[in-house]
Image: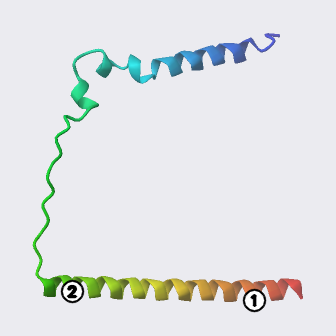
Amino acid sequence: MSGGAGHVADMNNRMKQNRSMKTSNKPKFKSDNRELNFSSGETEKLTFKKVSEEELARIRTEIRKKAESERKKERIIIALTALILIIILTIFLT
């Protein structure tokens, strides 16, 4: 009988693998590749489309209509699920 020696060997292998996975041991820290990990501090300016007020209002109403229809679908699904659950419970409990 090995007395658990296999478990100890497995533990040692796992510890060795974990040490090798540390970021300080990875090659990107050993050379001059620091731009892979650190930004230069420069931020890229975001540019947005210019949209007229009428188009913006149309987009808002479209989004609101979609959101309302999604809410209606969710309410119907919840109501049907509750109804089915009540029916199943009354069948099995009576």
Q: Position of residue 21 (x, y in %)?
A: 45, 23
**Where, quadrant-wise, is the C terminus in this rendering?**
bottom right
| Extreme residue toward the right, this view | 94
Report the residue at 47% width, 84% height from top: 71
Q: Residues within 10 Å of mark 2 (few under 14, many from 20)?
A: few
Question: Which label was assigned to residue 37?
Answer: none
Relative vertical location of residue 18 with respect to residue 44 in this rendering, above or below: above
Q: Position of residue 54 (x, y in %)?
A: 14, 88
Which amino acid, mark 2?
Ala
**Where, quadrant-wise, is the N terminus in this rendering?**
top right
Which amino acid, mark 1?
Ile
Report the residue at 56% width, 84% height from top: 77
| Extreme residue toward the front, this view | 41
Q: Which residue is mark 1?
A: 87
Q: Secondary structure at mark 2?
A: helix
Report the residue at 62% width, 88% height from top: 80
* Residue 40 left/right relative to 26: left
Q: Which residue is mark 2?
A: 57
Relative vertical location of residue 39 with respect to residue 32 in this rendering, above or below: below
Q: Nearer the viewer, residue 18 or 85?
A: 18
* Residue 14 left/right relative to 65: right
Q: Nearer the viewer, residue 78 or 31?
A: 31
Q: Position of residue 45 (x, y in %)?
A: 14, 53
